[in-house]
Image (cartoon, helix red, strand yellow):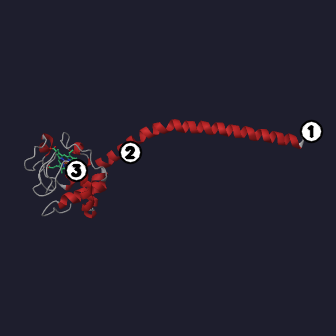
């Protein structure tokens, strides 16, 4: 058969329609697959992130926050202390609330605040509140002292803990030397 120019045009138009249809169909299929993926991904991600954060608090993070301590801003720590205020006072001779008064807590023997009923777990922990111990406790209270009465999830970010340690250190007439 002789192939006329209008045959080519006709075939071309057919092919164009077919392509448009096919890509539309494929596009829908892809979007649909994405939509199915998203919820599973969303459900998974925070866990993965938490696991990562957990790793950090367990290992590198303690060094991170202690290394940041020298340049940490006690003022930022004072602001962050809003998270702790419901349970702790900070002034010299301040009263105990749900938790003990924290004046001069850096370097103080653990569980030794006057007139506060500490948990057996914290009393048994022993030793003084060094910067490193405070850092570990504040990162995850129940991780450092399983059975502690302090119902607080923890300050996950090393920079936050560095600021908090700088603030706690300032609660003293003679702040302890930096580590
Ligand atoms: C929901 C109340 C609550 C919150 C919020 C809380 N704490 Fe506590 N905290 C406690 C209790 C209760 C204890 C005593 C723990 C024990 O006996 O096991 C404690 C103990 C402590 C200790 C040990 C004191 C000592 O004398 O040995 C430090 C340090 C401390 N908290 C710091 C903080 C900081 C900093 C924050 C905020 C980031 C905070 N806490 C948030 C209730 C709280």
Query: How packed is label 2: few (under 14 Cα within 10 Å), some, or many (20 or more)?
Result: few
The verdict on label 1 being within 8 Å of ligand 1 is no
Judge from the rendering whether residue 155 lies leftward or rightward of residue 168; answer left or right: right
**Residue under the image location 88 percent in, 43 percent down:** 5
- Mark 2 → mark 1, Cα distance in angstroms: 67 Å
Answer with mark 3 or mark 1, whichever residue precedes in sequence.
Answer: 1
Query: How packed is label 1: few (under 14 Cα within 10 Å), some, or many (20 or more)?
Result: few
- Mark 3 → mark 2, Cα distance in angstroms: 25 Å
The verdict on label 3 being within 8 Å of ligand 1 is yes
Q: Which residue in the structure is indicated by mark 1?
A: 2
**Residue under the image location 19 percent in, 57 percent down:** 168
Answer with mark 3 or mark 2, whichever residue precedes in sequence.
Answer: 2
Query: How packed is label 3: few (under 14 Cα within 10 Å), some, or many (20 or more)?
Result: some
**What is the quadrant of the C terminus in the image?**
bottom left
| Label at residue 49 | 2
Q: Are marks 3 and 1 in contact (CB under 8 Å)?
A: no
Q: Which residue in the structure is indicated by mark 3?
A: 84
């Amino acid at each position: 058969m002789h192939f006329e120019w209008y045959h080519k045009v006709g075939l071309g138009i057919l092919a164009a329609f077919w392509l448009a249809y096919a890509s539309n169909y494929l596009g829908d299929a892809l979007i649909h697959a994405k939509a199915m993926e998203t919820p599973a991904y969303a459900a998974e991600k925070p866990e993965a992130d938490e696991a990562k954060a957990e790793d950090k608090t367990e290992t590198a993070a303690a060094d991170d926050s202690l290394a940041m301590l020298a340049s940490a801003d006690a003022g930022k720590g004072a602001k962050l202390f809003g998270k702790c205020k419901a349970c702790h006072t900070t002034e010299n001779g301040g009263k105990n609330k749900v938790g003990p008064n924290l004046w001069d807590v850096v370097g103080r023997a653990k569980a030794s605040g006057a007139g506060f009923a500490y948990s057996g777990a914290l009393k048994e922990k022993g030793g003084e509140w060094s910067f490193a111990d405070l850092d570990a406790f504040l990162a995850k209270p129940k991780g450092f002292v399983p059975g502690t009465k302090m119902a607080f999830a923890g300050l996950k970010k090393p920079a936050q803990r560095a600021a908090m340690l700088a603030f706690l250190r300032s609660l003293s007439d003679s702040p302890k030397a930096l580590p």
